[in-house]
Amino acid sequence: MDWETGLEWAQILYLVGVGFYLLFFGLFVRYFFWRWYANKHFWNKRPQLSVAKVEALAREKGLEVPFISILVPARNEAEVIANTIEHLASLEYPKDRYEIIVITDEKELLARQEAGTDEPTTQDVVEAKIREFSGRAHVPRLKHCTVPYDFDGRYRGFCVGRSVPSTKGRALNYGLSAVDERTVICGFYDAESHPEEKVLLYIAWSYLQDPRERIWQGPVFQVRNFFQLGFITKVAALYQAISHKWYMPILMKRLPFVGGTNLFVGRRLLERIGGYDHRALTEDLELGVRAYLETGVWAEYFPFYSTEQTPSTFYAFYRQRLRWGSGHLQVCDKFRLAYHYDWERRGPLLYNLFWKGQGEWTLYQSAVMIPLIFLYLGINGYLDASVLPFAVRKGLQCIVLVYYAFTFCVFFHFRRLMAPVPWYEQILGALQLLALPIASFFLPLPYTAASVMKLLNRQPQVWVKTPRTKEATH
């Protein structure tokens, strides 16, 4: 017994457990503040745009409607790239003021030759769409470039005569050489991205109001293949989507966060900083940090989304997030040693990179481990709940219903963006969300693994492509 409080150690341990329970619930409640902030400053202020309105603003400013090049890296994407091209071609924007550039990889062709198969490659699909577009009206120009197997990966780089590892940054650097000479802004989308139809109008409208070199980053909702996911990745998809919608506006006040898709960057800015780091595991975050350190340009959030896929299996999800986590640590290391950048900018950035990376990962991993510890203590009789009144204990137990209610509300919020399936598959998919407590245990694991592997010097060294889910064609 504790002689000062008169409480048994089992009672003290129970109160400690309750304290952690309330702490993590308090952290969860932040979602509601984030929702208020994001809606007030972004989602409730989305302008009503049209081509005529943007063209009128351009005349008023004495400028042209900006020409936009959309770059889409696509290696082994034959199953999804046609849908993506069609979607991008349908965006509401003057068709003579933007182009779509699909960047494929020569290694895909070499692999087919080696395998001796006749399966269509991404290149085959893109070339077929180019022929189709040549006979269609009211479509933008569609271009195709293939990264040579020996391209060194640097912006305005060259071929070295030997195979070079493929990365997204390498592909984008090669694709930047193909943009139209009129291009003012470069947009970047993944091979299965489906952005909102007015996204280009918003970027043009924003640029015309302030025609500086800028970076715009929009949210990505990886829910389109929701009903093809396992129960862990279903939960991951929903919470990633709501974080991009509500939390990203807060995050981007602290970090010049840049994602690899639904991203727009001024062309001259890209040229000034030398394109992407082709060796980076997370070339997007690295670009945002380097752009700020070199030019002072801070990435801006914009409230027009793109839908995408979440990896369908936990293994694919784990590999993708492990790369993200390892890439985050790689960026921290790179700029920690970048002494040529001014410390007044670099210092606060490194601080925020740590707390928004390793710091949060440790907190979230603790959030799922601590309940397991106290569950073990309770089963073995080391906790005494009698220290609190019965009504209070029941009230604490009811908090779990808040988590479930929130998760199902998020599901219905994004339901319209999910690929249609029969009604019974919808019900079964929604019921899998009841496994929320189990799923939540696995979600931080890739990031924890990234930290552990970094300590052991076993972190991933190569960029790994995320597999796609096959979708119905248009």
Image: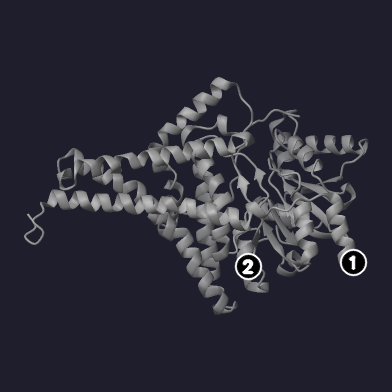
The amino acid pointed to by label 1 is Gly
- Identify the residue shown where x is 88% and y is 58%: 56
Question: Tags 1 and 2 in contact by the CB under 8 Å rule?
Answer: no
Q: Give the mark nearer the N terminus: 1 vs 2.
A: 1
Q: Is residue 191 left or right of residue 280?
A: right
The amino acid pointed to by label 2 is Arg
Nearer to me, 301 or 184: 301
Q: Is residue 25 left or right of residue 284?
A: left
- What distance separates the C-alpha of mark 1 from that of mark 2? 32 Å
Nearer to me, 228 or 238: 238
- In the figure, 287 relative to 231: above or below? below
Q: How is the image coloured?
A: one colour
Q: Name the disc covering residue 358, or none.
A: none
- Identify the residue shown where x is 73% and y is 29%: 473
Image coords of residue 328 (percent x, y): 52, 58
Image coords of residue 132 (percent x, y): 88, 34
Residue beneath disc 2: 290
Q: Secondary structure at mark 2?
A: helix
**Is residue 157 something that shows in the picture?**
no
Residue beneath disc 1: 62
From the viewer's perspective, is the residue at label 1 or at label 2 nearer?
1
- Identify the residue shown where x is 42% and y is 37%: 404
- Identify the residue shown where x is 55% and y is 57%: 37
Label 1: how many Cα within 10 Å (few below 14, some 14–19, many 20+): few
- In the figure, 3 relative to 198: above or below? below
Image coords of residue 284 (percent x, y): 63, 57
Nearer to me, 208 or 354: 208
Give the position of the C terminus as an image quadrant.
top right
Image coords of residue 358 (percent x, y): 44, 59
Give the position of the N terminus as an image quadrant.
bottom left
